Image (cartoon, coloured by chain):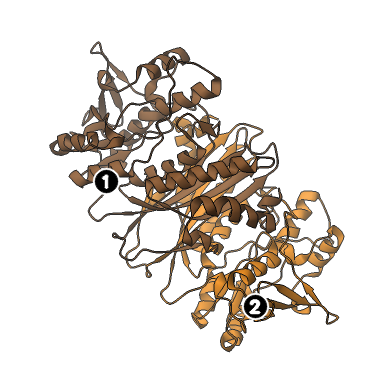
Chain colours: A brown, B orange
Amino acid sequence: MGHGGGGALSSELVEHVFLPSFRDEALARLGDSAVLDLAGLGGDRLAFTTDSFVVRPLFFPGGSIGELAVNGTVNDLAMSGARPLFLSTAFILEEGTDVTVVGAVAERVGAAAERAGVRVVTGDTKVVESGHGDGIYVNTAGIGLVPDGVDVRPDRAAPGDVVIVSGEIGVHGIAIMSVREGLEFGTALESDCQPLNGLVDAILGVTRDVHVLRDPTRGGVAASLNEIARAARVGIELDERALPIPDVVANACAFLGLDPLQVANEGKLLAFVPPAHAEAVLAAMRAHPAGLGASVIGRCVADHPGLVAATTGFGASRVVDLPLGEQLPRIC
Amino acid sequence: MGHGGGGALSSELVEHVFLPSFRDEALARLGDSAVLDLAGLGGDRLAFTTDSFVVRPLFFPGGSIGELAVNGTVNDLAMSGARPLFLSTAFILEEGTDVTVVGAVAERVGAAAERAGVRVVTGDTKVVESGHGDGIYVNTAGIGLVPDGVDVRPDRAAPGDVVIVSGEIGVHGIAIMSVREGLEFGTALESDCQPLNGLVDAILGVTRDVHVLRDPTRGGVAASLNEIARAARVGIELDERALPIPDVVANACAFLGLDPLQVANEGKLLAFVPPAHAEAVLAAMRAHPAGLGASVIGRCVADHPGLVAATTGFGASRVVDLPLGEQLPRIC
């Protein structure tokens, strides 16, 4: 408990665990806030977002709560068309958590921030009693700048837009489930957790006239598409045969009674692009390491506004619902 | 658990509990990030800060976790000389927490934000299983703009600076302890939790040449002064008789074996001001509702750099140490 009290033990934790992992001069100043100069960074519009991460277990194949916390917030900024710049991190530690585990997570945070090209500039640590936490919870907030001329938001989806997904879906949720529940699905599955800001740069390099970007995390592709359909009052038609679902995910979902469309992703995005630009955007995505498996999965229509429909392999049509609650608790 | 899954139950929580409390158009757009126009707001330098709040109990005399979460982050921004503008809020809810309690906290957040003149523009909710949280944890991050010419930071303290405190100290920590432990100290004590950005405006209205501002929260006045003495490599001399410690706090501290200098405050600030401006700054503080009890408590010296010394009522001198660990767990 002493490490959260704002005294000498807190200072030690900051100096020996967090500062070496994050290596940032604004953070090292240890003011109440980081002060950051925006002049010359381009753009007057700020993007601002936050997410808490409570994933269990803390480390999993392909990542940890540290990578999730950085990439989750970096990707939320990128989905607004922003260039991510600065992150805050706030740790809630459960009393008794091994300080080497805290250090390992902090190192993952630092490495992920470096990979994504963002700076961790401010932070906080609290400690709660044993039985009131679960090892480590991490919150990140992030700031980015939206380049002039970019206007990407859910309610800009328009009939005719081509819906592109950047790669295979359902991987993160199934990877977490397999390690947590000790399930074996034949092939080892790693989370797809990765930063998407580079891929968004590649897309916006083709055209700034991209209508919507969204990373289908909790609730999966189904939740993201339903939110977009409702926000823009458009219909969305999916071609079920075109969905890139790896066999291991399809098999695990069949076994667990899950819909792959509702399983979380942590390194994929959906792009809604006017048809004139769709081919060029798809090519640019496929040329980027985070978009190698990009494909067209559907289209925006004027019919059935607010509704997502999928055409099955047999030519029938079904409604893709917003999942009700939690299929897979604490996967991010 | 379903309310944290990113599906229909999550949407309901956002639409019926959070949006009505925060009433913000950027938040209501429900994008992955809030997009905020900075043009014309004045200043190129951004202040950015974060804090998690784990106070127990959630509601206490003079406030709640909601006011703490807003004012804590507003005050951290103000202590950098910034004008606070935007907040994020992220809730970690423990499964089984009454939704009316969540709603009541959200309302307190909304009201506190309105009082402080800041907008809640983006947010997140996660749910953890019973036994892995404690009702509600709240994280806020905040963004402000630093006016041109303002440069307030711990390492600017300089020998000669007059140290001013804005009012009575030790009140928040003792108020929380009294309600949590069911202690009676003769008088009902309310937390001093309040926003300090208005008071900082009043101070900077006198002169922009203020060296340090700090709100002595966790670890109290002792921790803040030690951090400043170390950051600026100056000595600080306190006049113990000048410390504004209310009788009820002094008595409670004597009873509990605490040093009032180490008890948390949530609505007070320390200002380090060059002597030429000290009198005018003190007068401006006393003319502001949040600074009515402002007084001079000490001075910066070139002697004993990094050390805080207090002259006692008997003329002796003692070292005021950085508290080691946690005196009063979870008071914010």
Question: Which mark's residue is nearer the viewer, 2 or 1?
Answer: 1
Which amino acid lies under the numbered mark 1 shown in the image of this protein?
Asp
The residue that appears at 65% across and 65% down in the rendered structure is: B216
Q: Amino acid at mark 2?
A: Ile
In x, y percent, where is residue B245? 76, 71
Q: Residue furthest bottom?
A: B276
Q: Where is residue A128 shown, x and y percent of the image?
A: 67, 44
Across and down, in percent, residue B81 comes to 50, 70
| Tag 2 and tag 1, C-beta contact below 8 Å | no
Name the foreground residue: B22 vs A32: A32
In the image, is residue B278 above or below residue A189?
below
Would you say B237 lies left or right of A57 here? Answer: right
Question: Residue B13: which numbered mark, if any?
Answer: none
Other-residue count near label 2 (Cα within 10 Å), few / some / many at <14 / 14–19 / ≥20: many
Q: Which residue is mark 2?
A: B164
Q: Nearer the viewer, residue A260 or A25?
A: A25
Helix or strand or loop: what does disc 1 sit on?
helix
The residue singled out by tag 1 in the image is A201
Task: Check disc 2 and report its element: helix, strand or loop.
Answer: strand
Q: Residue furthest top?
A: A314
Q: Is residue B113 left or right of residue B184?
A: left
Judged left or right of residue B272, residue A232 is left
Label 2, label 1: how far apart the Cα atoms are: 49 Å
Query: Where residue B63 appears, x then y in whole percent?
Result: 65, 56
Q: Residue at x 30, y 33 (%)?
A: A229
Residue B315, placed above or below residue B223: below
